[in-house]
Image (cartoon, coloured by chain):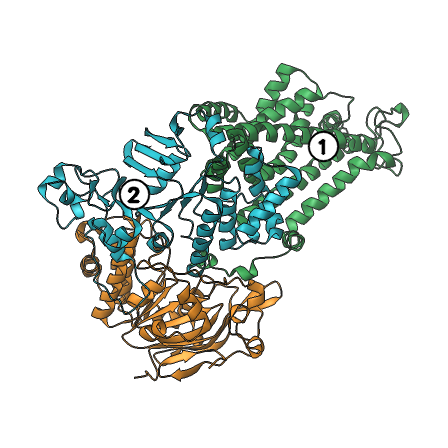
Amino acid sequence: MSVEVAAIQPRVTAEEGRLRRLWRVVREHRMLLIGLLILAIVFLMTTIGPLLLAHGPLQTNPELKLQPPSADHPMGTDNFGRDILSRVVHGARLDLLIAFSVVIIALGVGSLVGTLSGYYGGIVDDVVMRITDVLFSFPSFILAMAITAMLGNTIPNVIIAIAIAYIPYFIRLTRGEILSARELQYAEAARCVGNPEWRIMYIHLLPNCLTPSLVQATLCLGWAILDASGLAFLGLGIRPPTPEWGVLVSEGARNIISGQWWTSVFPGAVIVFTTLGFNLVGDSLRDITAREER
Amino acid sequence: MVEAQGLLRIQELSVTFPSRDGRVAILDRVSFEVGENEIVGLVGESGSGKTMTSLTVMGFLPPSGQVDGGEIWFKGKDLLRLTEEEMQEVRGGEIAMIFQSTRSALNPLMRVGDQVARVYQIQQKLSAQEAYKEAVRMLGRMGIPDAEERARAYPHQLSGGMCQRVLVAMMVACEPALLIADEPTTGLDVTIQAQIFELIKDVQRSTGASILLITHDLGVIAETCQRVVVMYAGQVMETASVERLFAEPCHPYTRRLLESVLRVDRVVEVPERELTPSEEATYSLRGCRFAPCCPVVLPRCWEERPARKEFRPDHWLSCHQI
Amino acid sequence: MGPLLEVKELVKNFHEGGALIRAVNEVSLEIYPGETVGLVGESGCGKTTTARCILRLTEPTAGHIYFDGADLTRLSSQEMRAQRRHLQMVFQDPDTSLNPRFTIRRTLAEPLQLHGLASGKGLEERLRETMVRVNLDPNYLDRYPHQLSGGQKQRVGIARAIITEPQFVALDEPTSSLDMSIRIHIIGLLKRLQEELGMTYLFISHDLSAVRNLCNRVLVMYLGRIVEAGPVEEIFDSPLHYYTQALLSAIPIPDPRLRRQRILLAGEPPSLLDLPQGCVFHERCPDAEPFCHRELPRLYDAGDHHLVACHRWAKR
């Protein structure tokens, strides 16, 4: 019943200022607000953080090794006497760089290929779908591990490896949207007016089909951090002494048994905190866009 | 002869919805009657409030809508004052309705014969077997060929016209006193539309029920209805018999409407001015909502809502001009 | 003077899950410059598919389409794109035929830019001029489709079609989703534009009252074939094919004094998957003879440029 009557909502009430609507949406979604807050903190940490730090991330101080959290070292020091807070803050920059690079590549390649696949169908679609099937058959972390092992342990390789694992998601999402969008009349009108195929695909259709991909991209930002940290923890990808959260957790892991919990727990907590932020934002966006589409 | 009480009498019904600046009256003091044994047409353009009126009668107002005044009298009861349980008694058995989107009104997972049979079970309290037999008979009466076989079909296997006949069958099976048909032929082909309207007229003749037919098509009104209610922007402008309305339309809006209708039997002159009011301006008016487009508007039309007057026997008008 | 558009033996088949659907079945027609030809019929008759084939928005299965002498079916996609400035279409649904992310300005400017017809200041002037032509406030250029009403969106669709000053415009049900009181104004607008810009129209519609008011010639389609053709008064005042008669009688007239005798056709149209042998209409025809089941009727001449695909009018 409600579906039917919802369809005849009077148009008079539909228009609401864009900014006001944005504010109402944010207010109604606590999770979104909290997620954004978390991300704001992380963002501040990466930008302003380094300027406020008392110590450098690579500054060793052997006599101060493995000190518990104190006023001078709020997160304590590691077994080389380095300030953990400083390493966490610098690690943030690296992890976020990796996360955004991964997502930009995966989203970019995925939506370009997905558009081609969805628009043309036929053999092109079949080939692309079989390739994504293969990629999907591996858990993304395993895939990233395999690729990193093949390519070598550098930051660019880590980025490429994780991006490759995520590309299939974006191909699928974009392809799905394009499949329905290409039947709409404005796509036909675009052809009628004289647009070449590539313009119809990338200038008319794709911009209208990006919403699910953007939501997924937000979630992928969080996953990328987990994947990068995970790889580093296992010794693949980024290696010490480069401050990266996974490296920090790995370095500190052996100290937990001997009681110096701060070396591992702080970096780990920051990973969880940041990923939580991205997940909250991503999930809320998914709920919001799904509701608006109804 | 004027029906004093009538079967359905809507009186000063107002329904509001939330909007950017408070609440807006989507229905503004709507009043009209449906008598016994007649087909009344409710005509207006999209957004005029005709569907909202029928939904309010059935108690299907969307959650954000609110009745702000008025009464809906049906067989001595004010429907607006009934509880949900009492309304459920009324729905179906007393007042039945068919909607625009045919296919979504039928259960896609149930055979059509069973759906009609269900109605018999609930409304007429028949046993499952008897109900099914009646259902097949009814489908046949609705003009569905090979009714026995078609009854076993699922909605997606039937054409739009067939589905609509099934819905009419379900409606008639309820044996209601009042049938509300809201644009029952949207999306159907012209020749099928003609069949469905003939069916509706047959049903009315054989059951003696009254029908409230909602449509934007003046041709359908002329050929199917006995009386007409003309709505614009949530207000009733004119009510009259079909012959009177077409021969001597009195409200400026009705006149404008009749002038701008395209016909199959001759070429029509395009009227000079077009009706393009801004929605917000229209709905916030205190007076007559047709004022912004009215060719004979008076200053008082903007401020003061014209009262509904029966200025000729059974010809009601809401206009300051008389 | 030769025809502007000539369609010869057009065939369009669709394959749906293994089944063959003959949507358009050997349709031939001619349209002369300045004409407004109506293509009418109910859903599934093939009128929209015919138009889409003419504009090569769908590829015809067989047949030829001659526009201004050139065979469109033989053009490469690049050549076809160049031709598109002369052949345009107004689409049915104003809600989905405009790109929701484009401003009106962008939607209207695109055809001009794609064909290199205007740029800079000239472009802006052309845009404003076209908006005024279709009775839209030029300030709406910066709006998005969702900020316009249905009637306004349809005008934008018309503006987009005429902005390159095409010779030929196909209009696919341009009034079907609009309110009754707006339809007549859109028809009036289309008439005026045709005079101003000297265009030729193919008007596709199941709304016969709109066709009556706009077209000078009418073609009636049923199940992929043309069953009747002729000048508009001939077709509307003296329809010869039973289907045309039934179609016309089904349309309600807004005048209660004219209670007519309705011609109700028996049953429903057969499915396109299972076309009957011989005349496509014989199963529902009250006058069908065994011969009708065997032989497909051509379009026979019934005098006064009136053609009917019915054996009753075969030359005796």
| Disc 2 residue crowd, few under 14, some 14–19, many 20+, Cα 10 Å | many
Q: Which chain is orange?
A: B
- Where is residue B88 shown, x and y percent of the image? 37, 68
Between C1 and C215, the one lying in front of the other is: C1
Is any part of residue B115 visible from this angle? no
Q: What label sits on residue C45 in the rendered view?
A: 2
Query: Going 36% across and 73% down the picture, which residue do you hit?
Result: B245
- Where is residue A52 shown, x and y percent of the image? 87, 37
Q: What label sits on residue B42 in the rendered view?
A: none
Which color has been applied to chain A in this rendered view? green
Query: Going 24% across and 72% down the picture, which residue do you hit?
Result: B208
- Dot 2: chain letter: C
Which color has been applied to chain C in this rendered view? cyan
Seen in the picture, residue B108 relative to B13 is either above or below; the reply is: above
Q: Which amino acid does label 2 sit on?
A: Cys
Q: Indicate the quadrant containing the C terminus of chain C: top left, top right, bottom left or bottom right.
A: top left
| Disc 1 residue crowd, few under 14, some 14–19, many 20+, Cα 10 Å | some
Q: Name the residue under label 1.
A: A96
Is any part of residue C43 visible from this angle? yes
Q: In this rendering, would B104 be left or right of C284?
A: right
Between B57 and C39, the one lying in front of the other is: C39
Query: Going 30% across and 59% down the picture, which residue do you hit?
Result: B265
Mark 1 lies on a secondary structure that is helix
